[in-house]
Amino acid sequence: MNIGIIGAGAIANVMLERVNHDAHENLKITNVLVRDKEKYQHLEKDFDVQLHADLDAFLASDMDIVVEAANVEVAKSVLPQVLGEKDAMLISVGALAEGKFVAQLMQIAKKHDTTLHLPSGAIGGLDLLQNAQAYGELESVKLTSRKPAASLTYETTEAEKAVFEGKAIDAIKHFPKNMNVAVILAMAGIGMERTQVLLIADPRTDRNTHHIEVKGAFGKASFTIENNPLPENPKTSYLAAISILGTLERINRNFVIGG
Ligand SMILES: NC(=O)C1=CN([C@@H]2O[C@H](COP(=O)(O)OP(=O)(O)OC[C@H]3O[C@@H](n4cnc5c(N)ncnc54)[C@H](OP(=O)(O)O)[C@@H]3O)[C@@H](O)[C@H]2O)C=CC1
Ligand SMILES: O=C([O-])CC(=O)C(=O)O
């Protein structure tokens, strides 16, 4: 499968290392879209990719799927065109917080027979949420995220502090680089308005921890993911990068586990 990536930061780098350097059996990253070609010129030689700064030229390349790994604003602006031409995968899922935009993308995908894949990112358990909600039987979903204070631009040597408490829809507005997990959780479960979020800035942790509590007709579940961060961008968990790779690997399989 030929893959194009939008963005060349922490997540894109893990992908380039794992897929192209380690010579993956079925996957190859062939094209990368950036906004500053000079800054990222070295990628062409390091990873044998074609670098682009122009979306039209990028989309004209031989790619089976385009993976967005840039940011929420970029995702919002390019997704309609990308999905009109190619299958796509989105990690800045905060771009999908507004229902109207999701509906527009679904129309485009239907018209052009393309698919938008949304990996679980820095969390897990989305199979459980989707099953529990399939017949509207989920009652409550609560996410408590704890991140290093510095990565929330909340510098302090004092005790931990709650920097946000409220709905998923507002969490992503205030923290677009940290609360994509709240949006994918809401999409899998009971939506942006009913998914409750608590975000804690913790000066004593170097991990991104996400604790999820779910209640419904099935019973209740709670689980915690203690993520190691990516050194290049400590806001971002390593799991987010490998959730893209895992999802790419599973796309063409002849059997499906979970889901
Ligand atoms: N769903 C989830 O669970 C998670 C989602 N994320 C999200 O994933 C995304 C990527 O994360 P990460 O790799 O850590 O981010 P980085 O900040 O490390 O990298 C972002 C990259 O996007 C590039 N970029 C910015 N604007 C454009 C543009 N207009 N066109 C092309 N490229 C552009 C940047 O380039 P430049 O150097 O020019 O700025 C940079 O290379 C973020 O939105 C992050 O919030 C992260 C973790 C978990
Ligand atoms: O990587 C993480 O732990 C979560 C994150 O940044 C996000 O959801 O935007």
Image: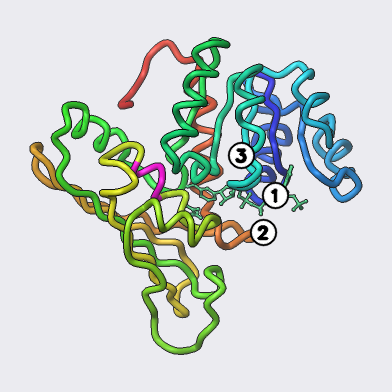
The numbered dot on residue 9 is 1
> In the rendered structure, which disc, 3 or 2, sits on the residue that comes first in sequence?
3
The numbered dot on residue 148 is none
Q: Label 2 CB, ligand 1: below 8 Å? A: yes
Q: Which residue is mark 2?
A: 232
Q: Is residue 135 above or below residue 70?
A: above
Q: CA distance from mark 3 to mark 2?
A: 21 Å
Question: The residue under label 2 is which amino acid type?
Answer: Glu
Horizontally, residue 32 falls left or right of residue 79, namely right
Q: Label 3 CB, ligand 1: below 8 Å? A: yes
> In the rendered structure, which disc, 3 or 1, sits on the residue that comes first in sequence?
1
Q: Whole-percent x and y of residue 109? A: 52, 17
Q: Label 1 CB, ligand 1: below 8 Å? A: yes
Q: Between residue 41 and residue 81, name the one nearer to us.
A: 81
Q: Between residue 22 and residue 142, name the one nearer to us.
A: 142
Q: Secondary structure at mark 3?
A: helix
Q: Which residues are magenta?
A: 182-186
Q: Is residue 135 magenta?
A: no
